[in-house]
Amino acid sequence: MNDSQFTHIDAQGNARMVDVSGKAPTSRTAVAVGRIAMSEACFAAVRDRTAKKGDVLGVAQVAGIMATKRTAELIPLCHLLNLTKSQVEFTLHPESLEIEAVCTVRCEGKTGVEMEALTGVSLALLTVYDMCKAIDKRMEIRNIHLVEKHGGKSGDFFFDGEAGL
């Protein structure tokens, strides 16, 4: 099988989970990022912790971490992983009225944690939306992507700003 073939489809076109039983566990890390843009009033409510639903970023942080641990239940054919680190951090960008979420995930395993990092950042941002939608329904979640990964057969990856199109 070459690198351009799909690994989650067998020769008959059936879905399958990739067999990683023959692989040795290695240290795996992935970092994903995304942003949510919002109105000035909404940004102020999040920043000042005055949103009616409570501490938006605190709840979103927990949601992102929980999501990393449940990725195999959400995305078909993902392996269940024993994560050793799951972290979600936020940076406020007042000049653009955006909040950036960064999710870092790590494990000692036979398969990568990219999907866990992407799921974590996605759910963290969706939680911000959910907690703030009464203030601003026009919020926009943007630019969710993998920024780096370490470990595994394919080695290290660093996002260079170029879309993979």
Image: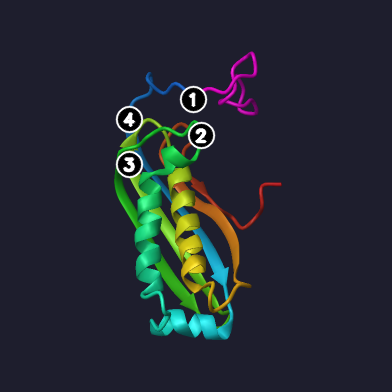
What segment carries the magenta color? 1-17
Asked if labels 3 and 2 touch by Cβ distance under 8 angstroms, the answer is no
Of the image marks 1 and 4, the number of the one nearer the N terminus: 1
Of the image marks 4 and 2, the number of the one nearer the N terminus: 4
Mark 1, residue position: 17
Asked if labels 4 and 3 touch by Cβ distance under 8 angstroms, the answer is no
Tell me if residue 36 comes above or below residue 6 in the rendering. below
Residue 37: image x %, image y %? 58, 73
Which secondary structure, mark 1?
loop
Tell me if residue 83 comes above or below residue 154 in the rendering. below
Of the image marks 1 and 3, the number of the one nearer the N terminus: 1
Residue 69: image x %, image y %? 35, 45
Mark 3, residue position: 107
| Mark 1 Cα-neighbour bin, 10 Å: few <14, some 14–19, many ≥20 | few
Q: CA distance from mark 1 to mark 3?
A: 19 Å
Three-letter code, disc 2: Pro
Residue 151 quadrant: top left
